[in-house]
Amino acid sequence: MLRLDDGASYEPSALLPAPAPVAMGRAVPILPAVIPAGWDRFGQLEVELRADFMWLVRRSESAVLAGGNLAFIGDEIFQFAAAEALGNLRFRLSGLLRGRCCMELAVATHAVDERFVLLDQGPMLTVMLDGAGIMPLLLVHLSWRRQAGQLHLSWIVQSRAGFGWPDLADVPIGESRLAFRAVLRDAAGIVAEAELNGSSWILADQAGPLWLDVAQVGATMGPVATLLVS
């Protein structure tokens, strides 16, 4: 028996022959962009596989968080929990985790008739990710407020370790240090910039509109998140 979710469910190992063919094909519709900060429980993706000996299976959310059902769609790596067989080599995938393995910026790059490849741990294929695997993740939930002549800016860090938040405790940082590069700019250029060791920035207030550009810094710099301060 195969266990992928700490005993929550088991699958007969006979269903996973070695070596097994990699399930691959194409996406039928365009996958819309989302904010990849949690489970997408409303989005769906329909894929058409290349051959009838290829198959996609449903996995529990615990199994997905343990690495199951990892796949490529276009240039994005994503995961799915549910796989509904529609016939004619087509499957409807739902329960999605988008922008996995530091590929958040690829969620908005999809086009018609994209490649779909299930990243099977048996017959794996080689893909060049250009160092994306060591990049910190995109910062989320950027916010601002004005108080007593000061501008308060803050954001929330995503972690490459502990995404599932199974015990409701703070997730580990996932980087060698907690550091951020922040730039505040207006229409004329840079107003202020700072290297920070916390997920907030307080500075003297000034008239907007302003834009905050902030990225987490680890072994390399992560993608830049932008917030409009009106």
Image: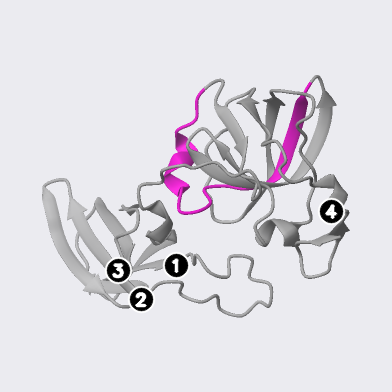
Name which residue lies at 37% across and 76% down.
176
Q: Is residue 87 above or below residue 127?
A: above
| Numbered range of the magenta stretch | 89-111
Q: Is residue 51 above or below residue 40?
A: above
Left or right, 227 with respect to 29, comes to left
Question: Does 164 appear in magenta?
Answer: no
Callout 3 secondary element = strand
Instruction: Name the kind of residue labelled 1 in the image.
Output: Val
In the image as oriented, which residue stretches furthest toward the left? 188
Place of residue 35 in the rendered image (x, y in percent of width and height, measured from the top left): 52, 48
Closer to the eye: label 1 or 4: 4
Question: Does 103 appear in magenta?
Answer: yes
Instruction: Name the kind of residue labelled 4 in the image.
Output: Ser
Residue bearing mark 1: 157
Q: For residue 190, what is the image quadrant?
A: bottom left
Residue bearing mark 4: 13
Callout 4 secondary element = helix
Name which residue lies at 58% across and 70% down.
162
